Image (cartoon, grey):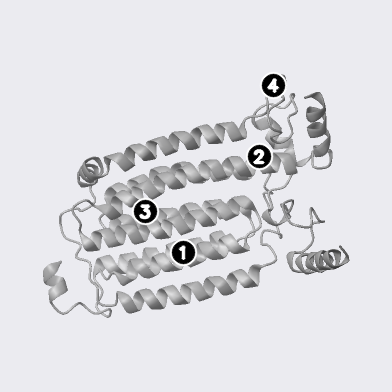
């Protein structure tokens, strides 16, 4: 088998997961996209392990470790998301803005909200 | 493998059976992944993720990595997706289509993803155009081979990983535990209403959006 096939598939899956992480609003959907990216990396690891045929099977061992780390990550991530949802009533990642510099603003659309917030921050600084 | 690599490498126009199956399953996997990141129905996204992860497991099998394939089925399809579904249901995901599943920076995300895919695919195809994997008859990823590699060369990382899993387990429990009403000096994690218990409290989390600040303030007042 050509190595290009699994490598291209892994690249496509990784880009899909990248799009999901950047474009999704729900935190759990973001976690799903992270899982897709991790799977792309695992596919690469396994393919290169089969290609290089190493004595220690580094690729497969590392793929197993990645799967275990992904399981730990999804457990902790879901606990955090549930905690945020319980305390905020929403798990939308673009509404969690309390740590912004200008304090919690009203949830607006990101582009306008960001531009408006930046404008108010600048004006506030100039006044100060 | 060495013979195949030393000789003229087989072209892309005469694919072997394994390659045809790999490409077909890869197309299905990629399509399922695309639907996962673009669908408006949240539960459907989780179910399409099952299809994508199962497709990746089949690709592992085609790459003769049996053990990884079954671990993938057990852990990802068996537990991670179930955890994600639990998470979706505990956060009261709507069953029908939710039009605000995508945030406002979707065009930027699309541009970044397309640029990334273009760059990676071009680079990978250019680098590994002539590389040939010899999938021999002996299984390189059977349970015996993987186990021997894991417990001969990778024992210490394996044990460290078990400690990591234990730490993640304890961390998840600590994070999701409700603050004890008798011990309310704990850092205010969520809304420490003592009447809520376990998952039932998380199920009605959406309704106390407005009154969320009150129990927290009460808890701090009591402490």
**Marks 4/2: CA–CA distance:** 19 Å
User: Label 1 neighbourhood size at 10 Å, few (<14), some (14-19), many (20+)?
Assistant: many
Q: Which residue is mark 1?
A: A14
Q: Quick check: marks 4 and 2 in contact, CB under 8 Å?
A: no
Q: Secondary structure at mark 4?
A: helix
Q: Are marks 1 and 2 on the same chain?
A: yes
Eyeballing the image, is A29 above or below B205?
Answer: below
Q: Nearer the viewer, mark 3 or mark 2?
A: 2
Q: Quick check: marks 4 and 1 in contact, CB under 8 Å?
A: no
Position of the N terminus of chain B by quadrant: bottom left
Q: Secondary structure at mark 1?
A: helix
Q: Which residue is mark 3?
A: B57
**Marks 3/1: CA–CA distance:** 16 Å
Q: Position of residue B126 (x, y in %)?
A: 34, 79
Q: Which residue is mark 4?
A: B183
| Circle 4 chain | B
| Circle 2 chain | A
Q: Which mark is residue A83?
A: 2
Q: Secondary structure at mark 2?
A: helix
Residue A89 appears left or right of B147: right
Eyeballing the image, is B150 above or below B56?
Answer: above
Q: Are marks 3 and 2 on the same chain?
A: no
Q: Does label 1 or label 2 sit earlier along the sequence? A: 1
Q: Nearer the viewer, residue B163 or A75?
A: B163
Q: Nearer the viewer, mark 4 or mark 2?
A: 4
**Marks 3/2: CA–CA distance:** 32 Å
The image quadrant that residue B185 belongs to is top right
């Amino acid at each position: 088998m050509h190595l290009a096939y699994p490598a291209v598939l892994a690249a496509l899956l990784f880009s899909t997961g990248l799009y999901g992480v950047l474009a999704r609003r729900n935190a759990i959907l973001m976690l799903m996209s992270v899982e897709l990216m991790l799977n792309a990396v695992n596919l690469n690891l396994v393919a290169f392990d089969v290609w290089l045929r190493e004595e220690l099977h580094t690729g497969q061992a590392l793929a197993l470790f990645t799967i275990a780390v992904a399981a730990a990550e999804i457990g902790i991530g879901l606990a955090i998301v549930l905690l945020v949802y319980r305390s905020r009533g929403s798990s939308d990642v673009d509404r969690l803005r309390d740590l912004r510099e200008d304090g919690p603003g009203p949830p607006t659309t990101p582009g306008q909200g960001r531009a408006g917030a930046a404008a108010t921050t600048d004006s506030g600084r100039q006044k100060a | 493998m060495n013979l195949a690599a030393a000789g003229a490498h087989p072209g892309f126009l005469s694919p072997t059976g394994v390659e045809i199956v790999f490409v077909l399953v890869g197309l299905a996997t990629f399509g399922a992944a695309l639907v996962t990141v673009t669908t408006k129905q949240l539960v459907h996204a989780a179910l399409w993720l099952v299809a994508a992860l199962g497709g990746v497991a089949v690709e592992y099998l085609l790459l003769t990595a049996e053990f990884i394939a079954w671990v993938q089925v057990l852990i990802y399809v068996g537990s991670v997706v179930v955890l994600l579904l639990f998470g979706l249901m505990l956060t009261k995901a709507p069953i029908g289509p939710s039009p605000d599943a995508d945030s406002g920076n979707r065009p930027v995300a699309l541009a970044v993803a397309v640029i990334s895919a273009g760059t990676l695919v071009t680079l990978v195809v250019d680098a590994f155009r002539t590389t040939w994997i010899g999938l021999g008859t002996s299984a390189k990823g059977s349970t015996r081979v993987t186990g021997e590699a894991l417990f001969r060369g990778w024992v210490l990382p394996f044990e460290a990983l078990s400690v990591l899993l234990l730490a993640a387990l304890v961390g998840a429990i600590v994070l999701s535990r409700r603050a004890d009403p008798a011990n309310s000096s704990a850092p205010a994690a969520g809304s420490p209403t003592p009447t809520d218990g376990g998952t039932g409290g998380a199920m009605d989390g959406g309704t106390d959006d407005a009154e969320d600040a009150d129990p927290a303030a009460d808890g701090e007042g009591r402490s």
